[in-house]
Amino acid sequence: MIKWLVRPIMIVAAVIAGWFVARDAVNFSIIQMVVVLLLVAALAAAAAILETLADRANNNNKRPR
């Protein structure tokens, strides 16, 4: 199950890392892992921001006028 969550992120990270480093380079896997960490951090930040925005939108709708 977790494979389904990790594999798309790894594929995107491989494509992004491929823009900067050749696939047969020695440090490709290191660059790919750095990109994966950045993508995971960006996804977590986006989820937190969207949750905060949704809470604010719900609180604005509940206020009496």
Image (cartoon, rainbow, N blue to C red):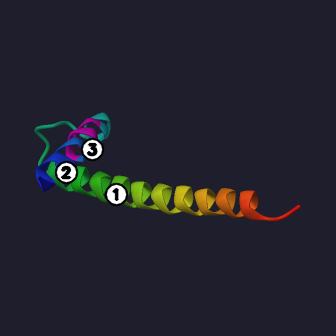
- Give the mark nearest the N terminus, 1 or 3: 3
Residue marked by disc 3: 13
Q: Secondary structure at mark 1?
A: helix
- Report, in whole angstroms, how far the alpha carbon at label 3 lies from the one at label 2: 10 Å
Question: Amino acid type of disc 1?
Answer: Val
Relative to residue 33, is residue 52 drawn left or right?
right
Q: Is residue 27 left or right of residue 59?
A: left
| Image-quadrant location for residue 62 | bottom right
Q: Position of residue 50 (x, y in %)?
A: 54, 55
Q: Are marks 1 and 3 in contact (CB under 8 Å)?
A: no
* Three-letter amino acid code of the residue under disc 2: Val
Judge the density around disc 2: few (<14), some (14-19), many (≥20) Cα neighbours within 10 Å: few
In the rendered structure, find residue 16 and report the number of the disc placed on it: none
Q: Residue at x 65, y 59 (%)?
A: 58
Q: Quick check: 65 left or right of 16?
A: right
Q: Quadrant of the C terminus?
A: bottom right
Going 25% across and 52% down the picture, which residue do you hit?
31
Circle on res. 6? 2
For the record, the magenta segment spans 10-15
**Residue 6 colored in magenta in the image:** no
Q: Residue furthest right?
A: 65
Query: Circle 1 sits on which residue?
Result: 40
Tally the marks: 3
Apparent side of residue 3 relative to residue 33 in the rendered image (left or right): left
Name, please, the residue furthest toward the front.
64
Between discs 1 and 2, the one toward the N terminus: 2
